[in-house]
Image (tube, helix red, strand yellow):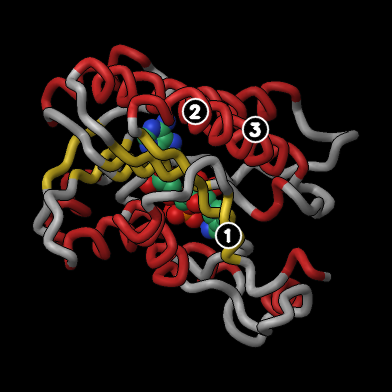
Amino acid sequence: MVTGGAGGIGRAIATAFAKAGDDVVVADIDGVHDAAGALGVRGVTMDITDDTSIAKALDEVGPVDVLVNNAGLLSVHGRLLELPAPDMLAILRTNVHGTFLMTQQVARRMVAGGRRGVIVNLSSIGGRQPTPGMGGYESSKAAVDALTRWAAVELAEHGIRVNAVAPGPVLTPMLAAGMPEGSPARAAWVSRIPLRQMASVEDVAAVVMFLASAGAAHITGTSVPVDGGQLLT
Ligand SMILES: NC(=O)c1ccc[n+]([C@@H]2O[C@H](COP(=O)([O-])OP(=O)(O)OC[C@H]3O[C@@H](n4cnc5c(N)ncnc54)[C@H](O)[C@@H]3O)[C@@H](O)[C@H]2O)c1
Protein backbone atom coordinates (compact mmCIF):
# COMPACT_ATOMS: atom_id res chain seq x y z
CA MET A 1 0.00 0.00 0.00
CA VAL A 2 1.39 3.35 -1.08
CA THR A 3 -0.31 6.34 0.53
CA GLY A 4 -0.28 9.45 -1.64
CA GLY A 5 0.16 6.97 -4.49
CA ALA A 6 -1.55 9.27 -6.97
CA GLY A 7 1.11 11.97 -6.49
CA GLY A 8 4.55 12.47 -8.02
CA ILE A 9 6.80 10.27 -5.88
CA GLY A 10 4.04 7.90 -4.74
CA ARG A 11 3.13 7.04 -8.31
CA ALA A 12 6.77 6.17 -9.08
CA ILE A 13 6.95 3.98 -5.96
CA ALA A 14 3.70 2.21 -6.90
CA THR A 15 5.05 1.72 -10.44
CA ALA A 16 8.29 0.17 -9.16
CA PHE A 17 6.45 -2.33 -6.93
CA ALA A 18 3.99 -3.17 -9.72
CA LYS A 19 6.90 -3.79 -12.15
CA ALA A 20 8.37 -6.18 -9.57
CA GLY A 21 5.12 -8.16 -9.69
CA ASP A 22 3.71 -7.07 -6.33
CA ASP A 23 0.00 -6.66 -5.57
CA VAL A 24 -0.06 -2.86 -5.22
CA VAL A 25 -2.73 -0.61 -3.72
CA VAL A 26 -2.64 3.10 -4.48
CA ALA A 27 -4.21 4.91 -1.50
CA ASP A 28 -4.89 8.62 -1.79
CA ILE A 29 -7.38 11.29 -0.83
CA ASP A 30 -7.64 12.30 -4.48
CA GLY A 31 -6.97 10.96 -7.98
CA VAL A 32 -7.05 7.26 -7.08
CA HIS A 33 -9.20 6.16 -9.98
CA ASP A 34 -6.89 7.68 -12.62
CA ALA A 35 -3.62 6.60 -10.97
CA ALA A 36 -4.66 3.03 -10.20
CA GLY A 37 -6.23 2.70 -13.66
CA ALA A 38 -3.09 3.95 -15.40
CA LEU A 39 -0.87 1.53 -13.44
CA GLY A 40 -3.28 -1.41 -13.59
CA VAL A 41 -3.24 -1.82 -9.79
CA ARG A 42 -5.81 -1.65 -7.00
CA GLY A 43 -6.84 1.70 -5.57
CA VAL A 44 -8.59 2.98 -2.47
CA THR A 45 -9.66 6.50 -1.58
CA MET A 46 -8.85 7.49 1.98
CA ASP A 47 -7.74 10.35 4.21
CA ILE A 48 -4.71 9.53 6.37
CA THR A 49 -5.75 12.18 8.91
CA ASP A 50 -9.04 10.37 9.60
CA ASP A 51 -9.00 7.17 11.67
CA THR A 52 -12.41 6.04 10.39
CA SER A 53 -11.43 6.56 6.77
CA ILE A 54 -8.23 4.55 7.30
CA ALA A 55 -10.08 1.68 9.00
CA LYS A 56 -12.64 1.52 6.20
CA ALA A 57 -9.91 1.46 3.55
CA LEU A 58 -7.91 -1.24 5.35
CA ASP A 59 -11.04 -3.38 5.76
CA GLU A 60 -11.62 -3.08 2.02
CA VAL A 61 -8.03 -3.79 0.99
CA GLY A 62 -7.22 -6.73 3.30
CA PRO A 63 -3.80 -7.57 4.80
CA VAL A 64 -0.97 -5.14 4.06
CA ASP A 65 2.58 -6.55 4.07
CA VAL A 66 4.38 -3.37 3.00
CA LEU A 67 3.16 0.10 3.91
CA VAL A 68 4.77 3.13 2.28
CA ASN A 69 3.77 6.24 4.23
CA ASN A 70 4.30 8.66 1.37
CA ALA A 71 1.25 10.96 1.57
CA GLY A 72 2.23 14.42 2.74
CA LEU A 73 1.68 18.15 2.49
CA LEU A 74 4.57 20.05 0.88
CA SER A 75 2.90 23.16 -0.42
CA VAL A 76 2.75 25.18 2.80
CA HIS A 77 5.69 27.58 3.09
CA GLY A 78 6.35 30.57 5.30
CA ARG A 79 9.02 32.09 7.49
CA LEU A 80 8.79 31.71 11.24
CA LEU A 81 7.64 35.30 11.81
CA GLU A 82 4.88 35.04 9.22
CA LEU A 83 3.57 31.47 8.92
CA PRO A 84 -0.11 31.45 9.95
CA ALA A 85 -0.60 29.14 12.95
CA PRO A 86 -3.39 27.13 11.25
CA ASP A 87 -1.00 26.36 8.37
CA MET A 88 1.51 24.90 10.82
CA LEU A 89 -1.19 22.71 12.35
CA ALA A 90 -2.29 21.53 8.89
CA ILE A 91 1.26 20.37 8.09
CA LEU A 92 1.62 18.53 11.38
CA ARG A 93 -1.84 17.00 11.07
CA THR A 94 -1.09 15.39 7.71
CA ASN A 95 2.65 14.68 7.84
CA VAL A 96 2.99 13.64 11.49
CA HIS A 97 -0.41 12.67 12.83
CA GLY A 98 -1.48 11.08 9.55
CA THR A 99 1.72 9.02 9.38
CA PHE A 100 1.20 8.02 13.01
CA LEU A 101 -2.42 6.93 12.43
CA MET A 102 -1.48 4.86 9.36
CA THR A 103 1.44 3.23 11.15
CA GLN A 104 -0.66 2.44 14.21
CA GLN A 105 -3.57 0.93 12.32
CA VAL A 106 -1.51 -1.11 9.85
CA ALA A 107 0.89 -2.33 12.56
CA ARG A 108 -2.00 -3.31 14.85
CA ARG A 109 -3.40 -5.46 12.06
CA MET A 110 0.02 -7.00 11.27
CA VAL A 111 0.52 -7.90 14.97
CA ALA A 112 -3.03 -9.21 15.39
CA GLY A 113 -2.62 -11.35 12.26
CA GLY A 114 0.82 -12.61 13.36
CA ARG A 115 2.31 -11.31 10.13
CA ARG A 116 5.77 -9.81 9.74
CA GLY A 117 5.85 -6.65 7.66
CA VAL A 118 7.71 -3.59 6.50
CA ILE A 119 6.95 0.12 6.81
CA VAL A 120 8.82 2.80 4.84
CA ASN A 121 8.18 6.47 5.60
CA LEU A 122 8.86 9.47 3.37
CA SER A 123 10.95 11.91 5.36
CA SER A 124 13.03 14.75 3.90
CA ILE A 125 16.62 15.88 4.17
CA GLY A 126 15.08 19.19 5.27
CA GLY A 127 14.35 17.51 8.59
CA ARG A 128 18.11 17.72 9.23
CA GLN A 129 19.15 20.84 7.30
CA PRO A 130 17.15 24.08 7.37
CA THR A 131 16.05 26.20 4.42
CA PRO A 132 14.49 29.60 5.23
CA GLY A 133 10.73 29.54 4.72
CA MET A 134 10.45 25.75 4.95
CA GLY A 135 10.77 25.17 8.69
CA GLY A 136 7.17 24.12 9.26
CA TYR A 137 7.47 21.34 6.72
CA GLU A 138 10.97 20.47 7.93
CA SER A 139 9.80 20.20 11.54
CA SER A 140 7.15 17.71 10.44
CA LYS A 141 9.78 15.59 8.67
CA ALA A 142 12.11 15.63 11.70
CA ALA A 143 9.11 14.24 13.59
CA VAL A 144 8.67 11.56 10.89
CA ASP A 145 12.28 10.48 11.55
CA ALA A 146 11.53 10.23 15.29
CA LEU A 147 8.30 8.35 14.56
CA THR A 148 10.33 5.94 12.40
CA ARG A 149 12.74 5.19 15.27
CA TRP A 150 9.88 4.90 17.78
CA ALA A 151 7.94 2.43 15.64
CA ALA A 152 11.10 0.49 14.76
CA VAL A 153 12.19 -0.07 18.35
CA GLU A 154 8.73 -1.16 19.53
CA LEU A 155 7.69 -3.24 16.50
CA ALA A 156 10.98 -5.14 16.11
CA GLU A 157 9.78 -7.87 18.49
CA HIS A 158 6.90 -8.51 16.08
CA GLY A 159 9.25 -8.85 13.10
CA ILE A 160 8.12 -5.54 11.64
CA ARG A 161 10.88 -3.30 10.22
CA VAL A 162 10.37 0.45 9.97
CA ASN A 163 12.67 2.78 8.00
CA ALA A 164 12.51 6.08 6.14
CA VAL A 165 13.96 7.67 3.04
CA ALA A 166 14.98 11.32 3.26
CA PRO A 167 15.16 12.90 -0.20
CA GLY A 168 16.47 16.32 -1.05
CA PRO A 169 14.42 18.16 -3.70
CA VAL A 170 12.84 15.65 -6.10
CA LEU A 171 11.96 16.40 -9.71
CA THR A 172 8.29 15.48 -9.58
CA PRO A 173 6.18 16.73 -12.51
CA MET A 174 4.85 19.48 -10.18
CA LEU A 175 8.32 20.66 -9.15
CA ALA A 176 9.69 20.40 -12.69
CA ALA A 177 6.86 22.66 -13.91
CA GLY A 178 7.48 25.17 -11.11
CA MET A 179 11.24 25.33 -11.71
CA PRO A 180 12.06 24.46 -15.33
CA GLU A 181 15.57 23.54 -16.48
CA GLY A 182 17.73 26.68 -16.52
CA SER A 183 15.49 28.64 -14.12
CA PRO A 184 17.10 30.51 -11.18
CA ALA A 185 15.02 28.45 -8.72
CA ARG A 186 16.36 25.17 -10.17
CA ALA A 187 19.93 26.54 -10.22
CA ALA A 188 19.66 27.60 -6.56
CA TRP A 189 18.65 24.11 -5.43
CA VAL A 190 21.19 22.32 -7.63
CA SER A 191 24.02 24.53 -6.35
CA ARG A 192 23.50 22.99 -2.88
CA ILE A 193 23.86 19.42 -4.18
CA PRO A 194 27.39 18.01 -4.66
CA LEU A 195 26.17 15.53 -7.33
CA ARG A 196 24.83 18.60 -9.19
CA GLN A 197 21.36 17.31 -9.98
CA MET A 198 18.04 16.93 -8.26
CA ALA A 199 16.73 13.46 -7.43
CA SER A 200 14.44 11.75 -9.92
CA VAL A 201 11.31 10.05 -8.61
CA GLU A 202 12.94 6.75 -9.65
CA ASP A 203 15.99 7.50 -7.45
CA VAL A 204 13.64 7.66 -4.46
CA ALA A 205 11.54 4.64 -5.47
CA ALA A 206 14.67 2.46 -5.79
CA VAL A 207 15.64 3.07 -2.16
CA VAL A 208 12.09 2.46 -0.93
CA MET A 209 12.13 -0.85 -2.84
CA PHE A 210 15.45 -1.82 -1.26
CA LEU A 211 14.27 -1.01 2.27
CA ALA A 212 11.16 -3.13 1.69
CA SER A 213 13.19 -6.05 0.32
CA ALA A 214 14.84 -9.06 1.96
CA GLY A 215 18.18 -7.40 1.23
CA ALA A 216 17.37 -4.94 4.01
CA ALA A 217 16.39 -7.70 6.47
CA HIS A 218 18.78 -6.39 9.15
CA ILE A 219 17.98 -2.68 8.73
CA THR A 220 15.43 -0.94 10.93
CA GLY A 221 14.97 2.49 12.49
CA THR A 222 17.07 4.39 9.98
CA SER A 223 16.34 7.29 7.62
CA VAL A 224 18.37 7.01 4.41
CA PRO A 225 19.34 10.27 2.69
CA VAL A 226 18.68 10.36 -1.07
CA ASP A 227 20.11 13.86 -1.42
CA GLY A 228 23.06 13.79 -3.84
CA GLY A 229 25.31 14.64 -0.89
CA GLN A 230 23.42 17.78 0.18
CA LEU A 231 24.01 17.01 3.85
CA LEU A 232 27.76 17.16 3.27
CA THR A 233 27.70 20.87 2.45
N1 LIG B 1 8.94 16.48 -3.96
C1 LIG B 1 9.98 16.65 -3.18
O1 LIG B 1 10.92 17.41 -3.50
C2 LIG B 1 10.09 15.89 -1.88
C3 LIG B 1 11.32 15.90 -1.17
C4 LIG B 1 11.42 15.21 0.03
C5 LIG B 1 10.34 14.51 0.51
N2 LIG B 1 9.17 14.51 -0.17
C6 LIG B 1 8.05 13.76 0.41
O2 LIG B 1 7.59 12.78 -0.51
C7 LIG B 1 6.20 12.56 -0.34
C8 LIG B 1 5.47 12.68 -1.68
O3 LIG B 1 5.70 13.99 -2.19
P1 LIG B 1 5.36 14.43 -3.70
O4 LIG B 1 6.39 15.39 -4.11
O5 LIG B 1 5.10 13.22 -4.53
O6 LIG B 1 4.02 15.26 -3.44
P2 LIG B 1 2.61 15.22 -4.20
O7 LIG B 1 1.87 16.43 -3.71
O8 LIG B 1 2.81 15.04 -5.67
O9 LIG B 1 1.94 13.90 -3.62
C9 LIG B 1 1.41 13.84 -2.33
C10 LIG B 1 0.18 12.98 -2.40
O10 LIG B 1 -0.35 12.84 -1.06
C11 LIG B 1 -1.76 12.91 -1.15
N3 LIG B 1 -2.32 13.34 0.14
C12 LIG B 1 -2.19 14.54 0.74
N4 LIG B 1 -2.87 14.57 1.89
C13 LIG B 1 -3.45 13.33 2.02
C14 LIG B 1 -4.29 12.75 2.99
N5 LIG B 1 -4.71 13.44 4.07
N6 LIG B 1 -4.67 11.47 2.83
C15 LIG B 1 -4.28 10.76 1.74
N7 LIG B 1 -3.49 11.26 0.78
C16 LIG B 1 -3.10 12.54 0.92
C17 LIG B 1 -2.02 13.94 -2.26
O11 LIG B 1 -3.34 13.82 -2.76
C18 LIG B 1 -0.94 13.61 -3.26
O12 LIG B 1 -1.38 12.68 -4.24
C19 LIG B 1 5.73 13.58 0.72
O13 LIG B 1 5.68 12.96 1.98
C20 LIG B 1 6.81 14.62 0.68
O14 LIG B 1 6.91 15.34 1.89
C21 LIG B 1 9.02 15.18 -1.35
Left or right of 122, for residue 205: left
Label disc, if present, on residue 167 of the rendered structure? 1
Q: Which mark is residue 151?
A: 2
Question: Distance of mark 3 from mark 2, alpha carbons?
Answer: 12 Å
Q: Is residue 192 above or below residue 217?
A: below
- Residue that carries the numbered disc 3 in the rendered image: 143
Q: Residues within 10 Å of mark 2 (few under 14, many from 20)?
A: many
Disc 3 to disc 1, C-alpha distance:
15 Å
Is residue 57 visible from the viewing direction of this image? no
Q: Is residue 78 above or below residue 49?
A: below
Label 3 neighbour load within 10 Å: few <14, some 14-19, many 20+:
some
The residue shown at (33%, 63%) is 12
Image quadrant occupied by the C terminus:
bottom right
Pointer 3 or 2: first along the chain: 3
Q: Residue at x 43, y 67 (%)?
A: 201
Label 2 element class: helix
Percent coordinates x, y for residue 151 in the rendering:
49, 28
